[in-house]
Amino acid sequence: MPITARRVRLLTPLAALVFLGLALLIRAVDDGALRQYSGTALYASMVWSAALFVRPQMAPVSAGIAATVFCWAVEIAQLTGVPAELSARSLAARLALGVQFDPVDLAWYPAGVVPLVALHHLVRVRHRRTPSAPEQPAELVPGGTG
């Protein structure tokens, strides 16, 4: 089955929903470090899904870098206090932007992205090895020489 931009755009929102569901499940059963750090990593996983949704043909490492840099930018923006102010007014802003800077989060964003980059790479390599259509001798191909 070929990997098309359309297929990526159908699958990435589903992946983001899986990441969100997993984050909410962990949040429901744990109130400690697992909750905090898995949420950070899964947030980065959702951002990776969004990056591929926007640019479905993006290479694995490029998607990983884009997602990580975006997450780092959001985290660093928390030093300004703007995300905290927006978060006080909106639950959506709180979930998307966070409230306060935590330097540990800077390490957890790549933890949520690196496994996806590896998986993305493996899928692309496998797809390249799989022929999309059976090859036919030139004399059987319309317009072929033979």
Image: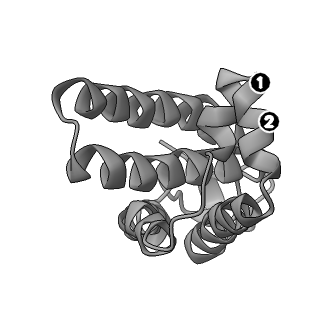
In percent of width and height, residue 108 lies at: 41, 67
- Tell me which amino acid carries mark 2: Leu
Q: Within 10 angstroms of label 1, few (less than 14), some, or many (20 or more) residues?
A: few
Question: Which labelled disc corresponds to residue 86?
Answer: 2
Question: Which labelled disc corresponds to residue 39?
Answer: none
Where on the picture, by quarter, is residue 53? Answer: top right
Depth order, front residue of 92/19: 92
The answer to whether residue 67 is above or below residue 88 is below
- What residue is drawn where x is 59% and y is 34%? 95
83 left or right of 39 in image: right
List the residue tagged with mark 1.
Answer: 89
In percent of width and height, residue 96 lies at: 65, 39
- Tell me which amino acid carries mark 1: Arg
In percent of width and height, residue 27 lies at: 29, 31
Where on the picture, by quarter, is residue 137? Answer: bottom right
Q: Within 10 angstroms of label 2, few (less than 14), some, or many (20 or more) residues?
A: some
96 left or right of 117 in image: right
Where on the picture, by quarter, is residue 126? Answer: bottom left
